[in-house]
Image: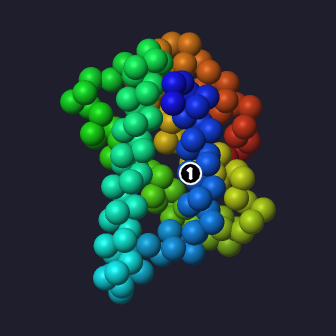
Amino acid sequence: MRDVEDAWFFLHTLFERIWAYRFLYRDLNDLLSKNRRLETHFQQVLRNKTRAIKALLDGMSRSGALHIDSRETEATATSMVVVLTYWLSYEYVRDPRHALEPESAQHALLRGAQHVLQLLVPYLEPAQRAHLIALATAYTPASGT
């Protein structure tokens, strides 16, 4: 991935996969505490997410869209994975009666992608930062940040 546009698409696609398994993500901690096999499997899922996010950061760095010190990459990737993993829980707490309903999915996923990418703002080149703002404005409803 080379730029904010690629990252936006990647994160939205990843959030669509998370949405497909929302039953798992909504009660993740409770489920993991009750199922050792699921616990170990989900640890692998987290490692894979972290690896994918690091690849995203690396690709954006190599293209010049992002300037991040290698010492900050691990913490930034981890923060992004935390938001990715627990975004649906946040949405659920925010609006328990509607958040995980299919008609709410698109807005929840777009908000999630936007918030994950906001973690990159300090590292983005000015044109990439402006493009992120434009994407967020175009795809995210004004009322739902």
Asked which quadrant contains residue 131, the reply is top right
Task: Classify residue 14 as left or right of residue 101.
Answer: left
Left or right: 66 with respect to 11? left
Q: With respect to residue 17, does 65 lie above or below?
A: above
- In this rendered view, identify the residue nearer to me: 36 or 116: 36
Residue 68: tell me if it is visible: yes
Q: Position of residue 44 (x, y in %)?
A: 34, 63
Left or right of residue 8: residue 31: left
Residue at x 38% of width, y 29% of height: 58
Q: Is residue 30 visible?
A: no
Q: Residue 61: horizontal and vertical position, in percent?
A: 40, 22
Q: Residues within 10 Å of mark 1 (few under 14, many from 20)?
A: some
Quarter of the image with the C terminus in it: top right
Depth check, front residue: 138 or 3: 3
Residue 75, picture quadrant: top left
Q: Is residue 25 above or below residue 35?
A: above
Residue most extreme to the right: 103
- What x and y, as percent, mark residue 121? 46, 26
Q: Nearer the viewer, residue 66 or 130?
A: 66
Q: Residue at x 33, y 65 (%)?
A: 43
Look at mark 1 in the image and give the residue it sits on.
14
Hey, which quadrant is residue 142 in on the image? Answer: top right
Label 1: which secondary element:
helix
The residue sitting at the left extreme is 71
Measuring 72% from the left and 68% from the top, which residue is drawn there? 101
Report the number of discs: 1
The coloring applied to the image is rainbow
Instruction: State the residue at coordinates (47%, 52%).
Output: 84
**Which residue is situated farthest in the bottom direction here?**
34
Amino acid type, mark 1: Leu
